Image (cartoon, rainbow, N blue to C red):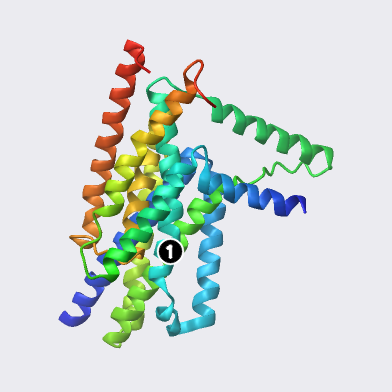
Amino acid sequence: MGRLRAFAAFWYDFVFGDDWLLALVVAVGLAATYGLAQAGLAAWWLLPIAVAVAIPVSLWRAVRRARPGGSR
Amino acid sequence: MTGGAGALFVAVFLACAVEGVEATTIVLAAGTARDWRSAGAGTLAALATLGVVVAALGPAVSALPLTGLRLVIGALLLVFGLQWLRKAILRASGFKALHDEDAIYRRQVAEARTEASAAGRATGRLRVDGYGFTLAFKGVLLEGLEVVVIVLTFGAGQHQLGLAAVAAACAVLLVAAAGAAVRAPLARVPENTLKFVVGIMLTAFGLFWGAEGAGAHWPGSDTALLVLVPVVALWALTLTALLRRRRATGLT
């Protein structure tokens, strides 16, 4: 049971890490890329743009938490 | 060697060298940023898995759903790479302590040693780091499967399977030797710089494989990576500079 819990904790940490937002953006970005590709449209640009927007948002959340008085 | 056989050798060699460079990059990233023992164990485990898969499936290995594998592995590399990049940017801009995770890792290693001694198993073996192992395992398994598919596709198409296998082996050995050669110089790079670079590489590879696995076609195919890596690096450096300025002016 302990090993199973450790295994689950490892994968949770691997996927979600310190900010679940990044994992969510990757999942939604990949789903949207799949949708575009299935529709026969160019889809390669979508994931890089989603990630380029997600990184500063995630950094801003971290900086806000690090600020004295910021929510944790 | 005839002209056709020579062309086959060169084509397979180059294609496999590209896959080899991608796998070696991931292993170097896992080894330098986590630990070499775990990256080595992940690489060996992937090669063993690859051997079993090839032995069990034979030529049918080319029917494996590589697109699905790319999607899963790309997605995992991307989420992991993004977390690393985020932490590296926060450290480089002064919003996170530089060595917090190293201290945790050293403590875990020390605890593992203590446990091994207490159990009378003090053989010098340390606990394998799951992150380093998993990163190396996934990278080598995916690229290894692609090398196998290249050999089968090119080799079977021209009834020169043996020659294609030799070309692939030459490419993989050459790239692996180059990877081993840059290992020592990498060790002299400052730690957070290394982690910054690893975050950039994992993010770029994750973007590439993930989007490809989801059905997107990159302009220029594999050469798109040569654009993705510097673009991700430039964006990360820009964000670091902006955060440093915010910290300096107290505009958090």
B103 over B55 or under it: above or below = above
The residue wearing badge 1 is: B142
Task: Give me the residue at 44% from left, 38% from top.
Answer: B84
Q: Looking at the figure, which quarter contains the C terminus of chain B?
A: top left
Looking at the image, the residue that sits furthest to the bottom is B159
> Dot 1: few (<14), some (14–19), or many (≥20) neighbours within 10 Å?
many
**Residue under the image location 21 percent in, 66 percent down:** A41
User: Which of the chains bears the disc numbered 1?
Assistant: B
Q: Residue at point 47% right, 18% down?
A: A67
Q: Is residue B142 something one can see in this rendering?
A: yes
Where residue B197 appears, as percent x and y from the top left, is: 36, 37
Q: Helix, strand or loop at disc 1? A: helix
Above-or-below relation of A17 to B73: above
Q: Amino acid at mark 1?
A: Leu
Q: Residue at x 84, y 42 (%)?
A: B120
Residue B37 in view: no
Position of residue B53 measured from the top left corner of the image (x, y, whole percent): 52, 75
Which quadrant of the rendered structure holds the N terminus of chain B? Answer: bottom left
Q: Give the x, y percent position of residue B102.
A: 55, 29
Res B220 quadrant in image: bottom left
Front residue (pair B8, A56): A56
The x and y percentages for residue B13 are 28, 67
Task: Left or right? Give the position of B203 relative to A9.
Answer: left
Q: Nearer the viewer, residue B215 or B125?
A: B215
Q: How many marks?
A: 1
Residue that sits furthest to the top in the current view: B249
